[in-house]
Amino acid sequence: MTRDLHTPLCEKLGCRFPVVQTAMGWVADAKLTAATCNAGGFGFFAGATTEAGDVENQLLKIKALTDKPFGVNFHMFQPNADEVLEMVIKHGVRAVSYGRGPDAETIGRLRDAGVVCMPTVGAVKHAVKAVELGANVITIQGGEGGGHTGAVPTSILLPQVLDAVDVPVVAAGGMYDGRSLAASLAYGAAGIAMGTRFLLTSDSPVPRSALDRYLETKDPSCIKVTKAVDGMPQRFIENDEIRQLESMSLPARLAMSLKYARQWGKDAGLGPLGMAKLGLKVATSGESSFAQTVMAPNLPTLVQRGVVEGDADKGLLPSGQVAAAIDRLESCEDLISAIMAQANDRLDALLALKRT
């Protein structure tokens, strides 16, 4: 039996299936976001890495490609955070996702405009705090996930958060097929969110040279967590750049970061004063140490080198461990159809089990 598996998540987001495409920086572009939505899932556009002045243009691109609801990701420490918030409200964006969070007043402003607030967290206490601040939905990411991640696996974190909050919870970290969806629903989740799996589709903007490196990686232990990039734990496919960073001294990494920071500030239109204000804002937020603040520019420079320029050796390739289980590219349409068919098969098999 084929079911849409319509959950409370579908009601809140206005999508057909409880499958979410996460907002990977420089990867979740207008095309990938729209392709996900057209396939019945819910796509988040990477607003956090969109250049100042270009947010509205990108939202209009998405609207030209789909008539389905979609979401936008942002964080409050990006220079154009106010622009993103203004455009989200102006264009009736259905949902926002975020990590480093907005305060209760900003969340209230979004909710008053009808925007679903859907942060991603990696710890129970952060989930509880996010709901206290006004989150409508919580996405939990277990340690298997890509990019910044925690140490707790999804199988432990998901039930803990389900017991701690009273809003729909979405499971991320290790999700890539219909079995992932069926298992998450059995836990009590309202759906799944996937980043790496959508990165590895034919609708992804990532160059083939980088995609091939993802597909060639068959050992999950080679998709490792490191603090060498910006001082915070992040999961990447191991390559020459990761090994070089890990071999460098902290002063050498800080010096490299300052070089990247100057270039990033120039590209973002921020002078020395603007850079200083932004750095002070991050440093005094309580979420980053001084070293992490200084090292932060490493991340956008090196990730863009990997997933935008396609340099699989000298760039960084953020990835969940599920990349080791993916052997081909397919369209978002084919991917989501396969996920739903397999999830239904697994749920039917469970229902067919005899009770004793």
Image: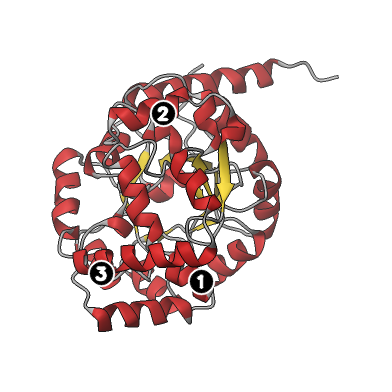
**Location of residue 216 in the rendering, given as x and y in whole percent from the top left corner:** 46, 23
Query: Quadrant of residue 68 in the image?
Result: top left
Vertical order, 247 against 114 (above or below): above
**Location of residue 15 in the rendering, given as x and y in whole percent from the top left corner:** 36, 40
- What residue type is disc 1 on? Ala
- What residue type is disc 2 on? Arg
- Work out whether residue 350 or residue 240 is closer to the camera in this orientation and state it: 240
Circle 2: element type: helix
Determine which residue is flagged by label 3.
Answer: 265
Q: Is residue 221 visible?
A: yes
Circle 1: element type: helix
Q: Residues within 10 Å of mark 3 (few under 14, many from 20)?
A: some
**Location of residue 52 in the rendering, given as x and y in whole percent from the top left corner:** 19, 65
Going 58% across and 69% down the picture, which residue do you hit? Answer: 129
Considering only order in the chain, which callout, 1 or 3, is on the residue closer to the N terminus?
Answer: 3
Determine which residue is flagged by label 2.
Answer: 213
- What residue type is disc 3 on? Gly
- Work out whether residue 47 or residue 183 is closer to the camera in this orientation and state it: 47
Query: Quadrant of residue 113 in the image?
Result: bottom left
Vertical order, 299 against 70 (above or below): below
Circle 3: element type: helix
* Contact check, label 3 and label 1, Cβ < 8 Å: no
Q: Is residue 183 left or right of residue 305?
A: right
Determine which residue is flagged by label 1.
Answer: 291
Going 66% across and 44% down the picture, which residue do you hit? Answer: 153
Give the CA separation, mark 1 to mark 2: 31 Å
Going 32% across and 62% down the picture, which residue do you hit? Answer: 260
* Contact check, label 1 and label 2, Cβ < 8 Å: no
Q: Is residue 176 visible?
A: no
Give the CA separation, mark 2 to mark 3: 30 Å
Q: Is residue 142 left or right of residue 96?
A: right
